[in-house]
Image (tube, rainbow, N blue to C red):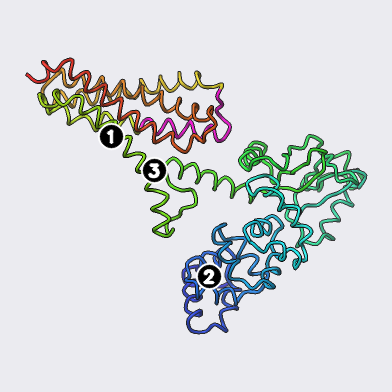
Amino acid sequence: MPAKYSFPEASQDVVSLLKQSPEELASALARLHPVDRAIIFQGLGEPEQVKFIQALGPAELGSLLEHLTPEWRTAAAAKIPRDKLAGALDAMTSDDAADVLQVLPDADSLLKSMRSGETVKPLLQYKPETAGGLMTRGFIEVRPDMTVGDALALQRTTDVSSVEVYYYYYVTTPDHVLEGVANVRELLRADPARLLSEVMRRDVVHVPPNADQEECAHLVQRYRLRALPVVAEDGTLLGTITSDDIMDILTVEATEDMYKMAGVGIKEWAFSPLGESIRRRVPWLSFNMAWAFAGAAIINLFTDTLDRAATIAIFMPMIAGQAGNAGIQTATIVVRSMALGEVHLRDFFKLLRKEWALGATKGLIFGTTLGLIAYVWKGNVYLGAIAGTALFLNMLVASTAGVMLPMTLRRLGFDPATIAGVFDTMLTDFMGFLIYLGLATIFISQIAK
């Protein structure tokens, strides 16, 4: 029975060997999963990272770089001797090797030292966030006049180190123009004597090399693909994007949207340097504070009302906060739906009607609740009615802003995830104070008696 693998214990062993027995470190690292090696590496200090790298061979270094985040890849690559780094890049998939080379100042010299340099070099002309920057050359290419049996035999004769996509055969002409795709699972059930041209699918979902990575992810999700071919304007098959890269894209895109809505830099993480965190967060909070003065100015307009009935102030945070949270809900759903391609600008009025109905329902529920609490607590029916009405109306404001702000920002060419949520909260604070204090001023004689 194999020994039970424990990551915490393995991590402690590696840290201990780094300090006590570097000569045994290589064998200890070889027993670790590549993902765990990357996690341990990121938690080490710089001197220990250098020892860590020295204990790894080219293939293990390649897998280490593949599993590091982009920021850590750059830092790790800078610590690797260049002859060893060239071997590590050769051991990586072509798309990951291209990602590393994109950020290295000596990429040209490294390409000349790599065995796979000619395969990786074409990928460097594309931006990392495009289909061309994500694609790999590791796929099996076949001709339409091949039989199913001959095509399946390629699985046994193809060099496994150069192939990432085994589940599809891409059927091309001698000039590498894509004509169709054959699923290996379907080929296994087909007559071995049939030609690929008879069994392949001709309606191939594909993208151009300049397609944005988010568009690629949507296509893979929509059509349940394991790989997405990248095709040039003349029909030439340039490469494929694998499903594991798509999973990474979805994670990155979701994280970016979340960070943007919180006003945090998309490259920040929990242990980013203090100075970097300050630079990323303080400007956004300063912007929020400036807008908060608008709410303070509204309150200042009604100081006479508050002087006559200070009880009014008790319910202001509830009216602003509850509507603000409702607005964040709407804005988040709209932003995410737009990012996934589920909602478009043409859906504005349809979506607004739905959110108005939802806002009115929430307004009735929470407005009635607040009104009753205010009446029972303070014994004033007018105060209860005003507080409940203000919350109801502010819920409608939140629903309107939650739809209108993201779609307006998209229409103007801005990323709605960046400021939609924050603007929605500021607007509900502003309007909540204005509606509530305005109504209270009208009926102050009934509240203050």
Q: Residue at x 57, y 61 (%)?
A: 68
- Percent coordinates x, y for residue 403 in the rendering: 45, 26
Give the mark toward the camera: 2 or 3: 3
Labels 3 and 1: the sequence-earlier one: 3
Q: Which residues are magenta?
A: 326-345
Residue 279, position as x, y percentages in the image: 41, 51
C-beta proximity under 8 Å, tags 2 and 1 = no
Tell me the element at label 3: helix
Q: Is residue 383 left or right of residue 42?
A: left
Label 2 vs label 1: CA separation? 59 Å
Dot 2 falls on a residue whose secondary structure is loop
Q: Amino acid at mark 3?
A: Trp
User: What crowding class fits label 2: few (fewer than 14 Cα within 10 Å), some (14-19), or many (20 or more)?
Assistant: few
- Residue at 45% over, 28% down: 405
Q: Which residue has dot 2 on it?
A: 4
Mark 1 closeness class: few <14, some 14–19, many ≥20 residues within 10 Å: few
Amino acid at pointer 2 = Lys
Q: Name the amino acid, label 1.
A: Phe
Q: Position of residue 324 (x, y in %)?
A: 34, 32
Q: Determine whether, in the image, residue 240 is placed left or right of residue 317.
A: right
Tell me the residue that label 1 is attached to.
293
Residue 386 at x, y percent in the picture: 21, 19
Picture quarter containing residue 370?
A: top left
Residue labelled with disc 3: 284
Which quadrant, please, contains the N terminus? bottom right
Residue 385 sits above or below residue 140 on the image: above
Q: Is residue 399 left or right of residue 198?
A: left
The residues tagged by marks 2 and 3 sit, at their Cα atoms, a distance apart of 48 Å
